[in-house]
Amino acid sequence: MKAAVLGATGYAGVVLLRILAQHPEIEAVLPVSRSAAGTPLSELDPGMPRALFSKTRAVDNRCIGYDEAAAENPDVVFAALPPLASAAQCDPFYDTAVVIDLSADFRIPNPEVFERAYSAPLPRAAQADRAVYGLTELARDQLRTASVIANPGCYPTAALLPLVPVAQEGLIQNTVVINALSGISGAGRKAETNLLFVERSENAGAYKPGRTHRHWAEIQYHLERLAARLPALFTPHLVPMKQGLAVTTVAQLADDLGEHDHAAVQDCLADRYSDARFIRLSRDRIPETRQVRGSNRCDIGWRIEGRYLYLFSVIDNLWKGAAGQAVQNMNVRFGFTEDLGLPDTGEL
């Protein structure tokens, strides 16, 4: 199988190349970048595994442009591009390849909701209508026949995986409060003052709280679509670490539940994720980002405090929050073993 990676120079693009280099079902890889076309891969990422170079020989082990990539007729295209630009850049591939988009362009197919979140019209609405929202563990059946896959954002992935099952089962009610901590790579690979080491080191704080962050719209939309009409308040924080994402969600228990109903939550999550290779339930142990860094796992813990349910979830934002989940979606779409080529072991 032949895979193209659009936006191969960004964080998600580089991680995709590293994963695909080791993936046994991928025979050829096309690293694609307008700004870096012609650049040798050894300059793009000196840490790239040797296996990638055997898969990029057809393009002389270099980045290529979009026209050259389209002429190569890839079977799957990963678009690791900025929002509002990605959908249009995928035009040459919609009818010939499975497109897995890591931007936000297809995550919210409702034009009004999308425009409120991104202050721009929904790009390529026809493609958005047929896109499958690729939160893998909750969308396997739809993914198997998808031609366009909208890879979820990192915050929505970590927030929705523990939240949707308990909401579907009616275990919670009223407003859901979601607080999240993200590593700096969650902001992308770009030169901005507030992302400099001297600005972020020894520094942490909230930004775009409540309903102002774009990912709030994605969380709210899919929480309602998949589970229930529960209002959500979302506050992200930027913390001084390279990668990793931790979410704490607090929700009021349903009227017929109380602090002694821990088993109801445990049974709900265990039933939903009993066959999920990349979901690890830590019960009352609060998971930490280091335990999942470099893996495609989401670890989920929970506690009941009086009338409230606490849900704790952690992911690596570059893996389960981006490139890893994209490959997981590819595996499901093409009938491969779901965990093929993906690690589930975190750091020591």
Image (cartoon, helix red, strand yellow):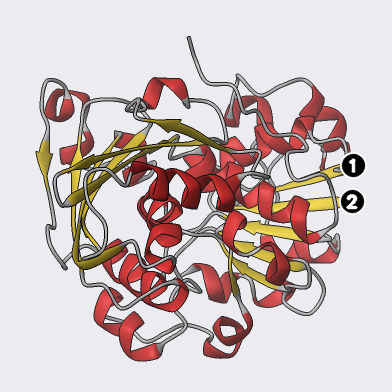
The one nearer the camera, 321 or 120, is 321
The residue pinned by badge 1 equals 27
Residue at 51% over, 74% down: 106
Which comes sooner in the sequence, label 1 or label 2? Answer: 2
Q: Residues within 10 Å of mark 1 (few under 14, many from 20)?
A: some
The one nearer the camera, 347 or 37, is 347
Hey, which quadrant is residue 189 in on the image?
top left
Q: Amino acid at mark 1?
A: Glu
Q: Position of residue 54 (x, y in %)?
A: 87, 29
Residue lying at the far top of the rendered structure: 348
The residue pinned by badge 2 equals 1
Residue at 39% over, 89% down: 111
Q: Secondary structure at mark 2?
A: loop
Q: Does residue 168 sit above or below 63 in this rendering?
A: below
Q: Amino acid at mark 2?
A: Met
Q: Secondary structure at mark 1?
A: loop
Q: Position of residue 96 (x, y in %)?
A: 82, 74
Q: Does residue 184 sit above or below 31 in this rendering?
A: above
